[in-house]
Amino acid sequence: MDTTPLRDAHHALLEAAAAVARATERPPAGEWDAGQILAHVSLVDAVTVTAAVSAASGAVTTYDNRVAQDSWTLRRVIALAGGEAGLRERVRLQGEALCALVAPLSEAELDTPVPTLLLSHGRVQVDGLVPLRDLVTGLAEAELPGHTKQLLNLLP
């Protein structure tokens, strides 16, 4: 699998996060700050890495993003990473790991159907089988660019 779009999406997200780190603006009420956005991305990356490893090993897996939206979990990830700088490094390394994991997968592995539950703002977006390839592509084409835009919206 060509991981260039995934690498590029991670790079753009991290550039936006670095720019936001230099700014002092707070997000509007009810919106995530940069740390929460990065913690969310870190959790989504981790779930995607788990799905890729499972597909490669032949293990049964699921893909569920609910934990990546839980405010207590986001705060815990921020604390465990040591703040936004630690989160940026974590997301960078997770992006590299994910690219390294999916690049050599066979077509059959990429076509592995993964039981998936995706929520956004409390609403179900996907509840069904999704090929691993589509989860990775969705991360590169929608999830990461969406959070990059969300970060850039925090700039003054």
Image (spheres, rainbow, N blue to C red):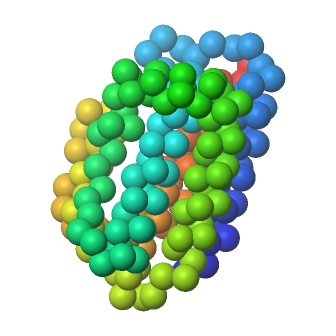
Q: Is residue 25 positioned above or below 91 on the image?
A: above
Residue 88 at what x, y percent from top left?
67, 38
Identify the image quadrant of residue 5. Answer: bottom right
Could you say which is closer to the camera, residue 70 or residue 139?
70
* Residue at 76 percent of width and 34 percent of height: 18
Residue 11 at what x, y percent from top left?
71, 52
Identify the image quadrant of residue 103. Answer: bottom right
Could you say which is closer to the camera, residue 68 or residue 100?
100
Could you say which is closer to the camera, residue 93 or residue 40?
93
The answer to whether residue 73 is visible is yes
Residue 30 at what x, y percent from top left?
44, 16
Q: Is residue 58 positioned above or below 81 on the image?
A: below
Quadrant of the frame with the C terminus: top right
Residue 133 as seen in the image, left or right of residue 112? right
The answer to whether residue 126 is visible is no
Identify the image quadrant of residue 111. Answer: bottom left
* Residue at 53 percent of width and 70 percent of height: 101
* Residue at 61 percent of width and 56 percent of height: 95
* Residue at 39 percent of width and 38 percent of height: 68
